[in-house]
Image (cartoon, grey):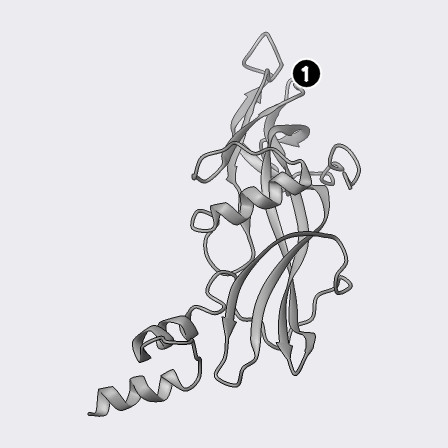
Amino acid sequence: MYSLSIVMAAALVFSSAGASPVTQLEARAGTTSKYGDYSGSTSSYGDGSGTYVRTDDVGTYASGVKCWTDLFYVSSSFQAKDWVKNENSIDCALTSVCASGTITGTQSCSWWNLAGSIESEWDIIKDIWSVTGSFNPGGGQLVCETAQSTNTCNWNDMKCHALWTSNVELVNKGYIRRRCHDKGQDYTAWSKDWNVNSPEKTTRLGCGALCTDTQYPGPVPAPPGAQRI
């Protein structure tokens, strides 16, 4: 009787015509399962701005209020990542060719900042990429890249040089908003910024560090290209 009372009480929170108490409980639990619940938050973007992508997390509460979550895309831009020390070094005192050649950077993978992993929400990511014009590798798997350097280093001294790389990400940005309908009117209950970071296939090679340096002696270079949209 005690467990049955819990189910019946939970069923009062969320209603669905003709649904059993267990079905109602499951439906209530899943009303924001796709993106998460960000009650109290407000997006930095204007409500309704950007490009509409899709709607999920639709549900009607026992009060009769129907709610859903819209996803909007706003912009894309490149972002430079911090310097990372490469495992390779060149000691010009010990070699006749004081040059680096092409260097492989650190591996990075696509990620986003909302509830759920990018693998589990792959359908959302693909819809975002279809709107932005970003690359879409297809399939249902995580996208990872091990970037290659586009430049090389050459020195004419007798010093030991450490190699550092700075990867680049394409950052797609937008927001989700929780919309509800009550008493003949629609309103926004809350909104939340999102971003999807996707690795580029190239990295920048820094040539200015010595083997004794624990930090790269220079700023991270600006990312290639301006904001796409």
Residue corresponding to mark 1: 154
Q: Residue at x 57, y 67 (%)?
A: 68
Q: Residue at x 61, y 24 (%)?
A: 149
- Whole-percent x and y of residue 207? 67, 26
Q: Is residue 170 visible?
A: no
Outermost left residue: 1
Outermost front residue: 18
Q: Which quadrant is the N terminus positioned in?
A: bottom left
Task: Kindly state the secondary structure of the residue where label 1 is placed.
Answer: loop
Seen in the picture, residue 91 relative to 106 is either above or below; the reply is above
- Whole-percent x and y of residue 146? 51, 30
Viewer-nearest residue: 172 or 71: 71
Quadrant for residue 11, please give it. Answer: bottom left
Q: Residue at x 50, y 61 (%)?
A: 115
Q: Residue at x 45, y 40 (%)?
A: 142
Quadrant for residue 48, please give it. Answer: bottom right
Q: Amino acid at mark 1?
A: Asn
